[in-house]
Image (spheres, helix red, strand yellow):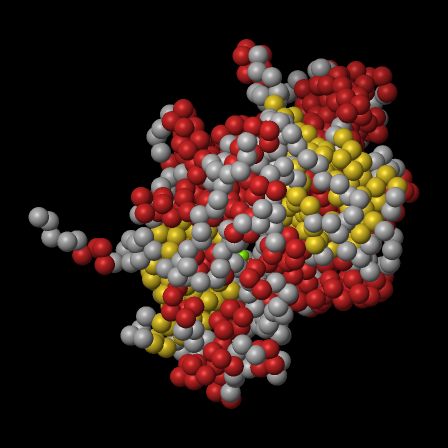
Amino acid sequence: MAILELANLSRHFEIRPGLLDRAFKGKASSYIKAVQGLNVTVEDNEILGIAGESGCGKSTTCTMISALMEPSDGDIRFKGRSILGLKGKALKDYRRSVQMIFQDPYESLNPRFRIADIVAEGPRALGLWRGEELDRRVHAILSAVGLPPAKYAERFPHELSGGERQRVGIASALIMEPEMIIADEPLSMLDVSIRAGILDLMRDMQAQKGFASIYVSHDLSILGNVADRILIMYLGQAMEVGPAREVILNPKHPYTKALIGAVPVPDPRSRRAVPNVRGDLSKPIDPPPGCRFAPRCPHADESCKTKFIALDTQDPQKHQAACHKLAEIGHG
Amino acid sequence: MSANAMSRSLRKLGLGLKEHYGIIATNKLSLLGFWIIVLFTLVAAFAPWIAPHEPWEMLFDSKGEFAALRAPSWEFPFGTTHLGYDLYSQLVLATRTTLLIGATSGFISIIIGANIGLIAGYYGGKVDEVLMRLTDILYGMPFLPFIIILIALFGRKLEFVILAIVLIIWRTSARVIRAQTIAIKQRQFIAMARARGASDLRIIYVHILPNVLPLLLLYAAFNIAWSIITEASASFLGFGDGETISWGGMLYELWLSGKTRVAWWWFATPSVCIILLVTSLVFVSRAYEEVANPRLRKR
Amino acid sequence: MQAPKTETKQPLLSVRNLGVAYKTAQGPVHAVSNISFDLAENEVFGIAGESGCGKSTLIRSLLRLLPDSATVSADACLYRGQDLMGLPDARFRKDILWSEISLVPQSAMASFNPVYRVGDQIIESIRAHKSVSKAEARERCKALFDVVGLEAGLLDSFPHEFSGGMRQRAMIAMALSLDPGLIVMDEPTTGLDVLVQERILRRIREIRSEIKSSIILITHDIAVIAEMSDRIAIMYGGEFMEQASAVDLFEQPYHPYTLGLKNAFPSIRNIGAELISIPGSPPTLIGPLQSCPFAPRCPFAVAACRSANPEIVGLEGGQHQVRCVRHADAVGFREQAKEKAVWQF
Ligand SMILES: Nc1ncnc2c1ncn2[C@@H]1O[C@H](COP(=O)(O)OP(=O)(O)OP(=O)(O)O)[C@@H](O)[C@H]1O
Ligand SMILES: Nc1ncnc2c1ncn2[C@@H]1O[C@H](COP(=O)(O)OP(=O)(O)OP(=O)(O)O)[C@@H](O)[C@H]1O
Ligand SMILES: [Mg+2]
Ligand SMILES: [Mg+2]
């Protein structure tokens, strides 16, 4: 059963030109279509990995799922019920069940809070635990993410390194024992060995308590290792979705192929192959209808620029790509 | 609550005493101002024990002569008035009144201003519109005449003087705190607090308030300084509480006596005190300005 | 013909025995100690190491961006022969920061002022150091935005309208804006997908050979560091454990920590293969070091490692520097370190 369903989810941002431009040159507003017609599900106990170009709408999707931003169109259903317009108690319950880990650890920690208070904030706000019970849990989770409380609990965020802050953000989400975690690049500033430790921790918690998760990352090798399924996005559209190994080892969409081909290898003697894409600037402002990858796609023709295929959610395990030219491209 | 637990919870609110002394001590003038304020506060606290005479007690010198309009001397360190009142005693007792009025109206006005600013800034929309129109109306009022009219309406009593000052002085603090709140509520740690389930009130008072605190203390110091000046002005114009002596009231009596040109000491003592205290408050607020506005910082 | 200048031999940046300690309630934290290195002109120097090992502290101390609670000590810190430590603050900010040494901070995403448009902030920083007109500065911004793969139209957006990676790219553009002699990048690619990353790194390499800048690059991404760097230092517990040319470091590593770090790196070529991580936790750094900081986690540690902090040894003619007592046995370790069991002693 799907715990989370995104149905035709869209979010547009208006860019208003400066006052002078609007008044004298009659410039109209332009739009960034950050997320456009996204259909995807997250199954029970599943980790859905999301990867895609920088600025393609991953964080926007995450904030909408966390009920911090309203979609422009479409629906978000959690356990079959729409979360749009939730209020009061229902909203509180939802916040308890779904926790987000924010992308930027330098912006998302309150500079006036001590580390222990940042981690304890969720339970305090919702009145989950108090007193010694809360202290015990805070200390346990801080140790679990590799921040010994004796050293870190009383510090302020500005006294921590980037990776240490990131772990504070993770701890503050995990302590809530949520049913679903929305992790927006949670480990981007951590080295591989600490990363492995935290992924183990999340796997243990998942085995014990069971939770679903959305995991956004630019690191495809991590996604290949932790995610059950992967969704690839480009400029707000879903390009490809399918079981993680399938997508990485056997990509269908030209964008996915380019992305995977550009993953660097740790060897100072080898150079990355120049990716097989045209141009190199993606234009998020006022994108044309049709497939947004078309202007850069080596296989695109006129029809790609007008028609777009939305992925379906009938069979979550199906490996599918939003491309007309799959037959032509073949597996070569 | 044990002293330790209390200091911990104060610290959580950003009110740790040590930290604040640290902020003030970074700047020599602020530190000087701080100690001058402490001195005035001590004088105010122990005024009845420090003052040798009643404020309106006609005095005779050691030779038994009526001590009218005496220049400062060993016997009357700050001189006397034309009716033989001891200016030193008046000054000490007036310190109490002035500080009481300054601190009370300063604090009440910052509490009102902060709440209005926080709520208007956080909720925005209609709430903001209504609250900010209210402040705009207050901005349209001429300051001193308005206060004088209020005192004339309410009556010349200490409470009413405070009330009149408070009613008008919160406007500036409300505005700046609203602006700061709007900037802070867009920061991502507020979104994080909301995602963790914090309610609106919790976000305002637990997450935003500590972040506007330096600004709030800056304006608290300003408000106290302004209250003191306002009270002095109102008293000087004869709209103070006639029953209690204040620095402005001392100047008013000087004016009434018509001895302004002769009795320089009568003029000097309250004026110097007003200037000293207000400047000290401004100096202390300077230290907070650096914290509240990091662009002023050296680096 | 002019005689070749002797200065070309002089390193661009030369640091000797740099140390930084933070004052904390638990005592001083020695976040960085005994750091020495030379950076040649037009060289890329990569620094890698565990989270919290002091990489950001190291470069922030060079740029004087540390909080007041930090004390910096150094025997020497010379930029083009000029002593950086002795320079008054005002001169440093005017003549060195941004115009000579620019920084892409690790907090790049949070480094813009939220109330001004991104383009205006970059223009302002250009005009603060160079006398150019607004229009010229704007043209420069457009060119820089193109380098980092952002549409020129985005110059008029506010920072909160950017995605995390877009802000990071804007910060890279700002660091390139004044053609500095040294660009310090602290995790510049954490928020970027591999295609954008490839493009930016390629363009940075091109620009670097045009304007002859040197780069200090800090990253967790071993692949990026291998791709970009001429020389690499591996940092642990506030000290450099090993320093060598990129090829030597990857092909003939001597320090057990380097071996462990290389092991733990996942590869897209073999998804699902188990990763060998280094068990244990980093040193607390409170108080001075009495032993090799890595000894408690090192499978090859002997008594000598625990009795004193080893000195740096120069191998291969001094080009390959290692801080390890057992460097002579390293050849054997290279194979052993690939076994998971070895690390779980
Ligand atoms: N508040 C906003 N106003 C206007 N545009 C916005 C706003 N927030 C996001 N955008 C735009 O929406 C697009 C998607 O942004 P988003 O933050 O979701 O990207 P992302 O996939 O998370 O990228 P990254 O990997 O770089 O973090 C971007 O083009 C961005 O400029
Ligand atoms: N202001 C401070 N006060 C006390 N300790 C600090 C302060 N800033 C950093 N530290 C500590 O110093 C150590 C080194 O921090 P630094 O930021 O240099 O790490 P880093 O190598 O950049 O790590 P990361 O890769 O996670 O960013 C960390 O353990 C950190 O907790
Ligand atoms: Mg993002
Ligand atoms: Mg760092």
Q: In the displayed structure, does residue B243 sit left or right of residue C15? A: right
User: In the image as oriented, which residue stretches furthest toward the bottom?
Assistant: C303
Q: Nearer the viewer, residue C25 or A216?
A: A216
Q: How many numbered marks does the figure carry?
A: 0
Quadrant of the frame with the C terminus of chain C:
bottom right
Q: Position of residue A297 (x, y in %)?
A: 53, 38
The part of the image, by quadrant, that contains residue C176 is top left
Q: Position of residue C62 (x, y in %)?
A: 42, 55
Above or below C123: residue A260: below
Q: Nearer the viewer, residue B121 or C186?
A: C186
Q: Position of residue A14 (x, y in %)?
A: 65, 26
The residue sitting at 49% across, 76% down in the picture is C256
Q: In the displayed structure, does residue B286 sit left or right of residue B59? A: left
The residue sitting at 53% across, 73% down in the picture is C260
- Residue B283 visible in the shown view: no
The part of the image, by quadrant, that contains residue C25 is bottom right
The residue sitting at 38% across, 56% down in the picture is C44
Above or below B84: residue A240: below
- Residue A175 visible in the shown view: yes
Q: Nearer the viewer, residue C228 or A250?
A: A250
Q: Position of residue A264 (x, y in %)?
A: 49, 56
